[in-house]
Amino acid sequence: MTNTNQSFLPVIILALSAFIFNTTEFIPIALLTNIGTSFGMTASQTGIMMTVYAWIVAVLSLPMMLATATIERKKLLLILFGLFAIGHIVSYLATSFTILLVSRAIVAITHAVFWSITASLVVRLAPIGKGTQALGLLSTGSALATVLGLPLGRVLGQVFDWRTSFGMIGVIGLVIMLLLAYLLPRLPAKNSGNLSSLPSVIKNKPLLSVYAMIVLTVTAHFTAYSYIEPFVLGITDFGADFATMTLLLFGAAGIVASILFGRYYEKLGDRFIAIAFGGMLIGLVGLMPMADIQGIWTVLVFIWGVSLTALALALQIRVLKLAPKATDVAMSIFSGIFNIGIGGGAMVGGLVIAGFGLPMIGYVGALIVMGAVAAFIYTKSAAPTDY
């Protein structure tokens, strides 16, 4: 094994960790109908699972990061995965929707801490000069959750039941915990920031602009994506199997976006972000008009997926560059507002469906993207230098 491979091994382990965390966060999207049926609820009613999970992460990311700021990172990760497994045991045994929500809350707390520290850890663990590639690898782990985790979870849910899917996620989480214990080096807390660094982060106008862009972008995405399964089943004529294929498509798009980010972001800078915004708009606006043309619809969804992941990566690395002495504080806020976007998008999508119907989710998502584009244009006019 080369030195480079040895150096990247801890990054790969954290990418696997990202895989399982993203799988569990978004698995309800693949199982909404099954979960709703078991508790006598509709898919739009069970969609509250996404909102509760996301908003717990949003509220607790910064407080939990500050509370754990001095804990050695390997030890902290092992504690998180222990709680992660407990949460999934409770999910598997849940006898009511309320208990299921409680179990999701347990997992959401671990999520709040995990994503506050992981981006800075992979950059720190990467070989010198390979921080961008390390972030891309972390994103690939996240994207594989959609390529492998969600479709497999959906298949397990169809063949057995949704409880089996949650149980398997818990088992995989335990395996990853063992890998972390065996292969991850000690990681003393470093440049995490503390409460005293919060004012400097809040007063950082370029950083606040990035936060505005990400919350609007993610809200736009999840306004439509949270309900992509019922959209495919109820609006298109593509069939139930294509709902699973759509989840695979988003995951594949995430992997492609990670590769494109690693190769082109540092060369293109703001142009990379502008192109990604254009891709999101095209994908969301075309969601309904192309719902009868499977080939074109598939291409549009793929473009949408690539663009979303590309934007998330680009804005994430800008946060790290804009707050080098308080990376964990800045990333905890990033994680928090990202999840405000997830929860807000799921809620907005539910309201759109209730008020206007499923066909409108793409259009409303596109309108919200325009808000993110406006924030991007404002940022460029106020501070045109790339960062």
Image (cartoon, rainbow, N blue to C red):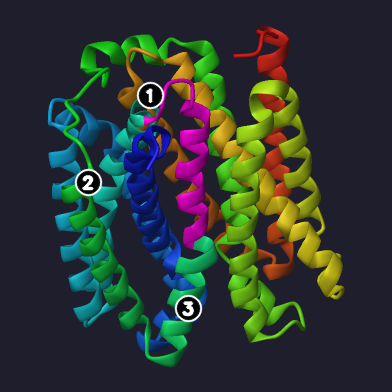
Per the model, the C-alpha gap separating discs 2 and 3 is 31 Å
Per the model, the C-alpha gap separating discs 1 and 3 is 34 Å
Three-letter amino acid code of the residue under disc 3: Arg
Viewer-proximal residue, 200 or 316? 316
Going from N to C along the chain, the mark reached first, 2 or 3, is 3
- Crowdedness near tag 2: few (<14), some (14–19) or many (≥20) residues, C-alpha within 10 Å: few
Q: Which mark is residue 154?
A: 3
Tell me which residue sits at (15%, 64%) in the image.
Answer: 86
User: Mark 2 or 3, which is nearer the eye?
Assistant: 2
Q: Which contiguous range is marked in magenta?
A: 126-145
- Crowdedness near tag 3: few (<14), some (14–19) or many (≥20) residues, C-alpha within 10 Å: many
- The local secondary structure at tag 3 comes to helix
233 over 206 or under it: above or below: below
Q: Residue furthest front?
A: 1
Q: In the rendered image, which quarter is residue 277 located in? A: top right
| Residue 180 as seen in the image, left or right of residue 329 | left
Viewer-proximal residue, 70 or 52? 70
Residue 335 lies, in percent from the top left, at: 40, 37
Q: Which residue is mark 2?
A: 183
Residue 89 lies, in percent from the top left, at: 19, 72
Q: Which residue is mark 1?
A: 330
